[in-house]
Image: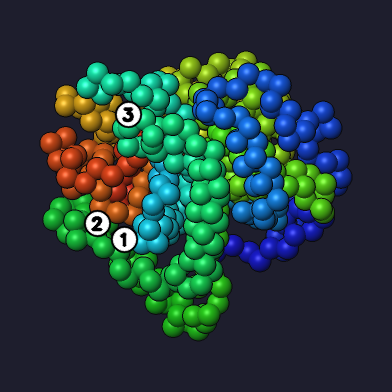
Amino acid sequence: SFPECVVENGIASSNVTRKTVDLKEKEPLTPRDWSVDSWRGKPAKQLPTYPSQEEVEKVVSYIKHLPPLVQAEEAKLLRYRLAEVCRGRGFVLQGGDCAESLEESTDGVRDTVRALFKMAMILMWGSLEPVVKIGRIGGQFAKPRSDDWEEQDGQRLPCYRGDIVNGAPFDLASRTPDPKRMLAAYQHSAATTNLVRALASGGFADLRNVKSWGMDWASKTEKGKAYLDTAERIEEAVRFWETCGVSSQDPIIYSTEVYTSHEALLLPYEEALCRRDPLTGDMYATSGAFIWIGERTRDLDGAHVEFARGVANPIGVKVGAGMQVDELLRLCDVLNPRNEMGRLTLITRMGSKNLASKLPQLVRALKKEGRHVVWITDAMHGNTYKTSSGVKTRSWNHILEEVRDFFAVHQAEGTRAGGVHFEMTGKEVTECVGGMIDLKAESLSKRYESLCDPRLNLSQSLELAFEIAEILKK
Ligand code: PEP
Ligand code: MN
């Protein structure tokens, strides 16, 4: 689905658009006043307190000698894809678990990637544009938390901070941060990234596989029948290409690109996986192709922003409802001083109640200042609530509402809605309420498996993709 790409002077460019790619850049992207450990001089939020700092440094110095999980070239290529989205070509789909599990099975990874492929097909059908697929996968192990402590039945323990830090079970041994988990996370990320690459390039993404949509849930309603109709039309288009003689071995039919991403939260681990690109001299976070800074750690003077500003990966920043125009402009200055397309993605997560009133001023200000960013919407994190029995959930309707408002704001401001970001899985879990399957609060306990936030299940994800495709069509 993408034009053939070459990587030239360390900048990915495409045969089709090479003329428009700015190759005059020779200044390194990594600033001179930055180093892999300069974050250590800044206040760092959300880092665990380990029993032994010595043990941490031992693990970290070991990881420093391990192979990178992604190559600089992959990060560059994604930067280029995102620059294309910035220029008005393409749409981003970022999705996956809130928190990956060290116990995740091959099937689990495969199901999530398959769900992403299906969603991407539907979005491509709607937009008639390439879809840049980014998984919250292959390293999404560290979690920021609102509370440092958790209390259950009178017992108080450190909160769960993701499998790279401690264990989810509510006992002291599990909850005590263990630096050796960084090694386990590295290994699991390596295996997962390898599997994702194999799935993307080895025929699993074959367009002819779309026949198994798994959409029994849709046949019961008129709206669902319309979705099935769209699915049928996508299949028809693929059959037509085949009839025209497009070889089934053609990469366009057979393979695709999926990039890995995670929140760059656990800085000692991120630092240990920084590698210099021999071609450009730039530093890359090789823990994943795309990394982002979370809503809780995006302080301008904080350690996480300091770390991210020096790596040349495409990076994201979460933008909550409290973000001020000045603050956002300064974040752009610090994280993308050269105002390069593809470098910075802003991931709004304002909630369906806030987005329509809070986003316009930010979009307008950046447009006025000529800042190049990709705007995508995380329609999950502003919509979390607890049911009357205390279960953390999100409503499918709120999620769709926030996505709709996101498109409406960009339409009104004359800017581009560049993509969507979801916590989702390919399994039929019961974590978010609503959707055509009409999942009720009472049913959430049936299959609630998330280690952290509630995810859309497969049917809820596909249904959302069909709705977004409708918006993109207009
Ligand atoms: C997340 O993406 O899982 C997350 C914690 O998001 P945010 O930083 O936006 O709260
Ligand atoms: Mn989350």
Disc 2 residue crowd, few under 14, some 14–19, many 20+, Cα 10 Å: some
Q: Are marks 2 and 3 in contact (CB under 8 Å)?
A: no
Q: What element carries label 3?
A: loop
Q: Is residue 126 above or below residue 271?
A: below
* Sequence-earlier tag: 1 or 3: 1
Q: Horizontal placement of 157 versus 437: left or right?
A: right
Q: Do the residues labelled 2 and 1 touch (CB within 8 Å)?
A: yes
Rendering coords of residue 387 (x, y %): 20, 27
Mark number, residue 226 = 2
Which mark lies nearer to you, 2 or 3? 3
Q: Is residue 376 above or below residue 20?
A: above
Residue at (31, 32) in percent of width and height: 170
* Sequence-earlier tag: 2 or 3: 2
Disc 1 residue crowd, few under 14, some 14–19, many 20+, Cα 10 Å: some
Residue highlighted by disc 3: 384
Foreground: 27 or 470? 27
Rendering coords of residue 251 (x, y %): 56, 73
Disc 2 from disc 3: Cα separation: 29 Å
Residue highlighted by disc 1: 230
Disc 3 residue crowd, few under 14, some 14–19, many 20+, Cα 10 Å: some
Residue at (36, 30) in percent of width and height: 172
Disc 1 from disc 3: Cα separation: 31 Å
Disc 2 from disc 1: Cα separation: 6 Å
Total labels: the figure holds 3
